[in-house]
Image (tube, rainbow, N blue to C red):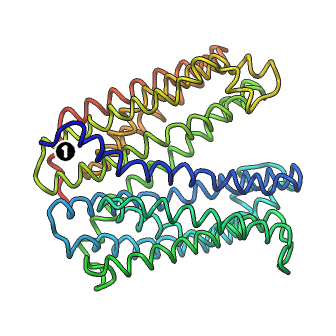
Amino acid sequence: MLPDSIRRRRILRLALPIIAAMVTQSLINLIDAALVGSLGEVPLAGVGIGGYAMFLITALVFGLSSGVQAQTAWRHGEQAWHQRALPLNAGLAIALLVSLPVTLLCLWQAPWLLGWLNPSAEVTDVAVEYFRWRVLSLAAVAMIFCFRGYWNGIQQSGFYLRIMLVMHVVNVLASICLIFGYLGLPAMGAAGAGAGTSLSLLAGLGLWAWISTRHAVACGFMTRLPERPTLLTTLRLATPHSFQQLWFAAGYAVLFWILGQIDTASVAVGHVLVNLSLLLILPGVGLGMAAMSLVGQSLGEQAHGEAHRWGWDVVRLAWLCLASLALPMMLWPEHVLGLFLHDPELIALARLPLQLTAVMIVLDAAALVLGQALLGAGANRTVMTTTLSLQWLVFLPLAWWVGVAMEQGLLGIWWVQLGYRCLNSLWFAAIWQRRQWLRVQF
């Protein structure tokens, strides 16, 4: 059994590049918004709506990452070196088969989808143009998820960070040129931001393919067609996670609808609080992805006790990390809010909910890590049913009842969310301790 200090270093060596890459990845929509901001309110709103629509569509293929990573980590633990890339081959085939028809459908039905998300015809027109350029890269996004899962699965997460940094450089340069018409290119406005982002994703896909061709052929990359059992296993693992991500994202749309039943100020404050929490939990998600690889590898080695211990080792690190990020929000909420809100009344409304958000982030650590660890064990359906049951059957109904029906407003909803986060982590901890996930076989 490894000493605690060595275990911590191993976790951090795997997790830190993932965390850094995820933080930069979360900036893609923010970069597009920042570049388009100078064009006015309508283009900015259109990019925001189009970016959210792309987030929903991307959720359909999100599970490919965990499906490939879990199988790869398991085979890595089994020391089946020449078979490690076979799940990657299967994931890439599924990515193409799913994303191409979805892309065509989205190009055709973009006006309906964006019109459903936003009632303004002027904003919808901009959003449709932006979204159509973005959705052209859906196949690239799906395949990037597969490559990321493979390289994280063999604990080579540094490639993920380096490729993301290159993609951001391409995104900024291409978007600036296409938005404003530099270097003889057409001035496309907001649509140029979408085209630039898609070009950066295609560049990222090319880098992933080049690296994998150089280093993963000996592990089976593109040496033969995917076999039916591997395809079915990848689908079985990926589908619940994708379904979970889609409905989890839709749950936030319902939350903002609930806030809209209260008043406009609650919607504005809610957007700030949610975006802050989604950004600050990324270290927890990154540590969870590290746990997915470590748990999968240990199960491949048939080291069941080690697999269980890795889960709690990563949770303890996540608690420390998230607590340090949450501390400024707890101690100096006005200063943090002042970065986003400039109306004293909105800051006063958001003060206590922000402090509750700080507590939530820490409470969420066990759910973030153990949920990902369970994906590494192949218990994807358990993660899906637990996450969606608590969100849709507990949190959202209670949020409406307390916030709207009982007229407790934004603060009441955030107290409900605090209880929901606590229950979520306790539930995942109980599942982890019962160890039924040890019975799952790939």
Q: Quadrant of residue 356?
A: top right
Residue 274 lies left or right of residue 392; in this view the side is right
| Quadrant of the rendered image containing residue 186 | bottom right
Residue 321 placement (x, y as % from top left)? 43, 33
Please name the residue shown 61% across and 70% down the image: 105
Neighbour class for label 1 at 10 Å: few (<14), some, many (≥20)?
A: many
Q: Quadrant of the N terminus?
A: top left
- Give the amino acid type for the residue marked by disc 1 in the picture: Ala
Q: Is residue 416 left or right of residue 242?
A: right
Residue at x 21%, y 59% (from the top left corner): 74
Is residue 214 or residue 136 the one in the foreground?
Answer: 214
Q: Which of the 4 image quadrants contains residue 300?
A: bottom left
Element type at mark 1: helix
Residue found 46% across the figure and 73% down from its top: 208
Quadrant in the picture for the C terminus = bottom left
Question: Against 98, is 401 above or below?
Answer: above
Camera-side residue of 111 and 211: 211
Residue 256 placement (x, y as % from top left)? 66, 35
Residue 230 percent across, percent down from the top left: 26, 71
In percent of width and height, residue 213 lies at 38, 81
Q: Is residue 322 left or right of residue 166?
A: left
Residue at horizontal 29 percent and vertical 85 percent from the top? 223
From this view, report whether residue 397 is shown above or below residue 249. above
Above or below for 231 versus 113: below
Q: Which residue is mark 1?
A: 307
